[in-house]
Image: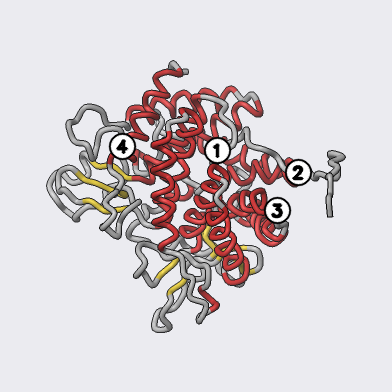
Amino acid sequence: MIKERTVLDSAIACAEWQVRNQVMDRQDANRGRFIRSYDQASGSLIYTGNWQTGAALMSLLSMYRQTNDEKYLEAAEYAGHYLMSLQILDQRNTRFYGAIRELTPQSMEMDPRDATTAAWALVWLYNFTGKEEYLRRAILFGDFHLKYCMHEGWPQYSFYMERRFGNFYARGSFQSGTGLFYHDLFMASDDARYITGGMRPIAENYVKYFVNDDGSLVQEREIFTWRLQEETKQPTVTPCMHMYNDDFGAAMLQTASDIFKDEKFRQAAFSYAQWLASNQDEDGGFAGGSHPSAVAVALMYFHDLGQYYNDETLLAARDITLNKLLDMQYHETGDVKIDGAFKGRYEGPAGFPGGGDVCVNNRVTSYALSALIKVECDVKDIWLGRNNKIFSDPLKEGVLYDLQW
């Protein structure tokens, strides 16, 4: 393993990049957003939408938990208020009440998995601050998602809020992490519907329909038949990316094993981690470096599952992956939009000379920050943490309440 101080230094530099580049002008409607992607050659800069803002928010809360530096909590709250500005609170159309728009308050589209990360961030803001408004907003989204996004135990692909556009219905494997949102919302709200109607069917269907015997993942299935279908072509997603970056499905499975007392879920996660390790590039990347976001996600799984099973192969893969991730971080370039962030997928103009040579992407950077904190220490009660509180029925614990009325 690399020295722990080196890992913490890297995490601090990453968090500083997020805070330094957050929009803070009170008269700017982007206030609270972070850099989604920035390319040095073309100067192309895009701000975070709902899920990237949420992921950055939760990773900064992890940094706050580790350092107690208030500026990270403050940045997370600014991000949370931007996310709340995306939420639909107009009750005239009950179908979208509680939904969270994709990019800005004017967006007419919503991907349930993306919006889930935004609502997930509000759960964690409530956990850290105790402010009821954050939880209330997350519950509004959770109730909307249960009612309108879950179809036979799996979330819908995409919604469009104008009838002239048709919705997308495919069952994507990347929806698996939604189960962990439902778990965290249950732990915060004490509403068991989020487990029985949300987490449990997602966990069961993920193991049944998406995790192959060799640990690899099925990417998509048809909405009403569960039949295999070719992966949807998305211009902003590299082909097969979610085979390597599972969008926290394996993290969800580990928590499912804890709450359901069933090791089949953790075994599925372990099988996937083994598949990742056996399909890793020699330098620690994946698919020739075409899936940079997978590096941080794999690091979390190699660490958590390698430790749980005391598996030498996964622990060795963890060390290789950590070195790869640290090599992806930019330092001392002199560009405040670059230094501290991690090299990610290029989203600038097509064919631009030098485009992509030096570029950062918040998908990689937020995941990297969370992964580094997990590897650096055993901090508790953080997003994606494996040392978080495990559900226990108060009745089983023999709890007695001193009831006055």
Instruction: Tell me which colouring the rendered structure shows.
Output: secondary structure
At label 3, which amino acid type do we have? Asp
Count the numbered circles shown. Answer: 4
Q: Decide: is 112 above or below 289.
A: below
Residue drawn at 55 percent across, 78 percent down: 94
Marks 1,3: beta carbons within 8 A: no
Question: Which residue in the structure is indicated by mark 1?
Answer: 382
Residue drawn at 16 percent across, 53 percent down: 351
Marks 2 and 3, the one that precedes in the sequence: 3
Marks 2 and 1, the one that precedes in the sequence: 2
Which residue is nearer to you in this view: 114 or 279? 114
At label 2, which amino acid type do we have? Asp
Q: Is residue 316 left or right of residue 226?
A: left
Q: Secondary structure at mark 3?
A: loop
Looking at the image, the residue that sits furthest to the top is 3
Q: Decide: is 168 above or below 270.
A: below
Marks 1 and 4, the one that precedes in the sequence: 4
Q: Secondary structure at mark 1?
A: loop
Q: Quadrant of the C terminus?
A: bottom right
Question: Which residue in the structure is indicated by mark 4?
Answer: 17
Question: Which residue in the structure is indicated by mark 2?
Answer: 262
Circle 1 packing at 10 Å, graded few (<14), some (14-19), many (20+), is: many
Of discs 2 and 3, which sits in the foreground? Answer: 3
Q: Which mark is residue 43?
A: none
Marks 3 and 4, the one that precedes in the sequence: 4
Residue drawn at 61 percent across, 46 percent down: 252
